[in-house]
Amino acid sequence: MKKAGIVSIGNELLNGQTTDTNASWLAGELWGMGIVTAGVWTVPDEVSRIVQALKTAAEQTDILLVTGGLGPTDDDVTRQAMAAWLGVELEFQPDWLEKLKAFFEDRGRKMAPRNRTQAYCPAGCERLDNSVGTAPGFCGIADGVFWAVMPGVPAEMTQMFNEHVMGRIRGLAEGGPVVVSGKLRCFGASESDIAQQMGDLMRRGRNPLINCTCGSGEIVLHIVATAADKTEGMKMLQDDKHMLRELLGDVIFGEDDSGLSLVVGQLLRQHKKTIVIAESCTGGLLSKILTDVPGSSEYMLAGWVTYSNEAKISQLGVYEQLIRDFGAVSEPVARAMAQGAAQKSGADVAVSVTGIAGPGGAAGGKPVGLVYIGVLIDGVCDVKECRFGAASRESIRMRATLTALNQVRLRLQI
């Protein structure tokens, strides 16, 4: 099986100013072609450091992808580093200079003299034209390792990879073992509970290999099958998915990239039901995630963000005495919010969320992370008490949102 290395270049990647999304994206594309990423090296804009990373990565891989440092400024030194690693000089390419001039003229601008540096590439390499920017890439083979250098701007990198690099890599990967992967998405059980139910299915060396990642209460099981061909790999993958569904039951809500909002939307369409949202501590996040799904206007009627007590009373018809007796963060108020939203909108499904997202606000025995979620369907309202602990405000809001969606899912699946 072919192995790849990714070298990401740029001071901004090391000082926290920019997240290296390029490496993650490339690793995913390589994985889809059955190529394992052996490592990612992140280095500053220094020729010596780049050359050392290239040497180290090339020793461990068959394919080397480099991004960043191809701009026109003094700190863009990837060209010089690549030439030093290859042991060649930089070579001026007048035809690319003409393309650069035309690029700026088409936009009503005059090319700055600094951009001339982008018309240089290491001698003997193959240039990769940039159809959306000014920095060309280049590729070649050194000591049996295929390498390609691409811009660091994500849009330019992905365009160049798709147009010029992917086909070359796919040809290198042909004839080897095939890697087929898929995901099962879970909610409503902890990572440790799922691991306990799965027993030794996550042991290292098993084929298919099952990995687990988690965030905001959602657990994703990654299933990776290695086979002689795609047909065999797909069968192995589907067999494992079926086994895990039998084992974990309703904890599994979707496959691959189907999030909770998409699954809930599909269920609402299936049952021909409409939904309305009344939220407090989540501040509109639940409505936002639910309407991120294209076509959600078919079932989403309205949403209220009733952050204050006054808004809960005036907008949703919650009795003031109810808030005085039990507090805004309580089971009776969550129930009244859902009932009020359903009555005012005429929706079949109403969801309410009220809680303490923190970091302050804890009082009267009600801690940060306490959230009540009401789900009313066809007049029947269930309220769930959740205690998410003293996590970050963002985490509590997201977990409350996903838990609310999951409660709707479980009710509609009955």
Image (tube, rainbow, N blue to C red):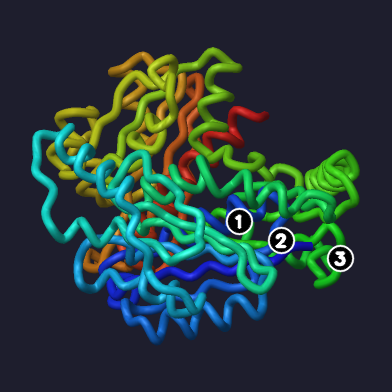
User: Nearer the N terminus, badge 1 or badge 3?
Assistant: 3
- The CA span between labels 2 and 3 is 18 Å
Could you tell me which residue is drawn at 42 percent across and 51 percent down? 157
In-front residue for pair 122/139: 122
Helix, strand or loop under label 3:
loop
User: Nearer the N terminus, badge 2 or badge 3?
Assistant: 2
Between tags 2 and 3, which lies in front? 3
Q: Name which residue type carries label 3.
A: Arg
In-front residue for pair 386/7: 7
Q: Give the position of the C terminus as an image quadrant.
A: top right
Vertically, is 268 above or below 163? above
Q: Give the position of the N terminus as an image quadrant.
A: bottom right
In-front residue for pair 1/77: 77
Q: Name which residue type carries label 1.
A: Ile
Could you tell me which residue is drawn at 39 percent across and 62 percent down? 121
State yes or no: discs 1 and 3 in contact (Cβ < 8 Å).
no
State yes or no: discs 2 and 3 in contact (Cβ < 8 Å).
no
Badge 1 crowding class, 10 Å Cα cut-off, few under 14, some 14 to 19, many 20 or more, is many
Badge 2 crowding class, 10 Å Cα cut-off, few under 14, some 14 to 19, many 20 or more, is some
Label 3 sits on residue: 206
Label 2 sits on residue: 194
In-front residue for pair 66/11: 66
| Horizontal and vertical percent position of residue 180 | 76, 48
Classify residue 105 as left or right of residue 130: left
- The CA span between labels 1 and 2 is 9 Å
Label 1 sits on residue: 219
Could you tell me which residue is drawn at 31 percent across and 77 percent down? 45
User: Nearer the N terminus, badge 1 or badge 2?
Assistant: 2
| Horizontal and vertical percent position of residue 39 | 59, 73
State yes or no: discs 1 and 2 in contact (Cβ < 8 Å).
yes
